[in-house]
Image (cartoon, rainbow, N blue to C red):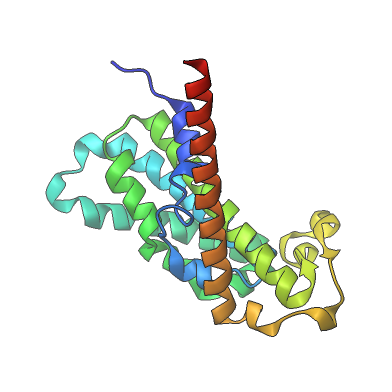
Amino acid sequence: MATTDYGRIIRDGLWDNNGVLAMLLGMCPTMAMTTSATNGLGMGLATAVVMAASNFMVAAFRNYITREVRIPVYILIVAANVTFVDLTMNAWMHELYKVLGLFIPLIVSNCLPLARLESFASKEPILPSLMDGIFMGLGFTFALTLIGAGREILGSGTLFADASLLLGPAFKFMELRIMPADMGVLMMILPPGGFLVTGLVVVGKRLLDIRAGKGIQMAGAHSV
């Protein structure tokens, strides 16, 4: 039995196969919930919890889920976990819950969790599947927070605005004023800004990947 490469699972989730930056999945919440870094962080973490729990459950019961009914079962499992997250956020993070609104239930139809259940959790043991869910979710969180930060800074001049209101008083330290409010570009917090910033972030990632690939090739050539 081959040893699981947990390092590869972590790299794939956070960077190499990042759901947003590499696979371009989950674009609906990416466009809608990244008007600020706080919203992106909240949405990303909610999705990460659902992905980790769903991957764990599918991996645990994969030998009992027949191929013919696997998609309805996956959706049912994701829906159950989304309901749990939805009720928990409503009870304990109500301000953030009101901001995220409809997009929490829509995690059920998000392509990314379903894609990981089909391509990974349904084929792998429990621990690797749990790790995949956690780090794919954290990669999604990273992407949404990064895009939200870019849009918020350029559009409002702030970073993690209302973090203490949405996430709790302990997060007050995250609230920053980067530039004067009258220097903000309104378009960046409107839908066109979502497409623009997301496109720039995706291009930036691919340029970094190309540069890293060239660096590895040059190092290999020198070693020879």
User: With respect to residue 165, does 14 lie above or below?
Assistant: above
Q: Nearer the viewer, residue 155 or 171?
A: 155
Q: Point out residue 1 in the picture as x, y percentages from the top left corner.
A: 28, 15
The residue under the point 72% across, 72% down is 154
Coordinates of residue 83 in the picture (x, y in percent)? 46, 61
x, y percent for residue 29: 49, 68
Q: Visible in this render: residue 144?
A: yes
- Pinpoint residue 108: horizontal percent, then vertical percent: 39, 62
Foreground pick, 75 / 201:
201
Q: In this view, does 221 lie to the left or right of 123?
A: right
Picture residue at 48% right of the left edge, 37% below the top: 213
Q: Is residue 114 or residue 65 the one in the foreground? A: 114
Residue at figure coordinates x 47%, y 30% from the top left: 217
Q: Can you say whether 129 is above or below 78 in the image?
A: above
**Direction from residue 173 to residue 18 in the image, left or right:** left
Taking the image as shown, residue 1 lies to the left or right of residue 151, namely: left
Residue positioned most to the left: 68
Residue 33 visible within the image = no
